[in-house]
Image (cartoon, helix red, strand yellow):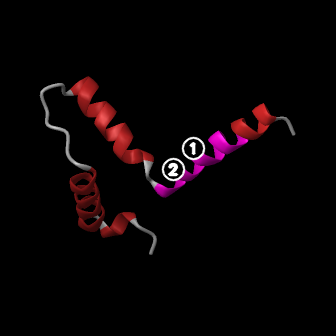
Amino acid sequence: MTTDGLRRGVRWLHWYLREVSGESAYDRHVAHLRSGHPGASVPTRKEFERWRMDQRDSRPEARCC
């Protein structure tokens, strides 16, 4: 495997793990706020995660377990 191939593989794995774990959700949320709601304040990561957990807890029927 070439060095470029290895780098691509590592970048893909990093991207995949961030998507599966939900880590990239905050980045997408911030990008959405900045492009669609320029005057809105951007929450900290901690505030976003709290909001996200509150949203999940408010809809227990949406989960399988």
Q: Residue 33 in magenta?
A: no
**In front here: 24 or 10?**
10
Q: Which residues are magenta?
A: 9-21
Residue contact between numbered discs 2 and 1, judged by CB atoms under 8 Å: yes
Specify the farthest residue to the right: 1
Read off the residue under disc 2.
Answer: 18
Identify the residue shown where x is 59% and y is 47%: 14
**In front here: 44 or 34?**
44
Read off the residue under disc 1.
Answer: 15
Q: Position of residue 18 (x, y in %)?
A: 51, 50
Q: Is residue 61 left or right of residue 41?
A: right
Q: Position of residue 63 (x, y in %)?
A: 41, 67
Q: Position of residue 42 (x, y in %)?
A: 19, 39
Q: Residues within 10 Å of mark 2 (few under 14, many from 20)?
A: few
Identify the residue shown where x is 27% and y is 24%: 35
Identify the residue shown where x is 84% and y is 35%: 2
Q: Is residue 20 left or right of residue 27?
A: right
Q: Main secondary structure of the magenta part?
A: helix
Name the amino acid type tagged 2: Arg
Q: Is residue 22 left or right of residue 57?
A: right
Placement of 32 over or under 18, stated as above or below: above
Disc 2 to disc 1, how far (Cα)? 5 Å
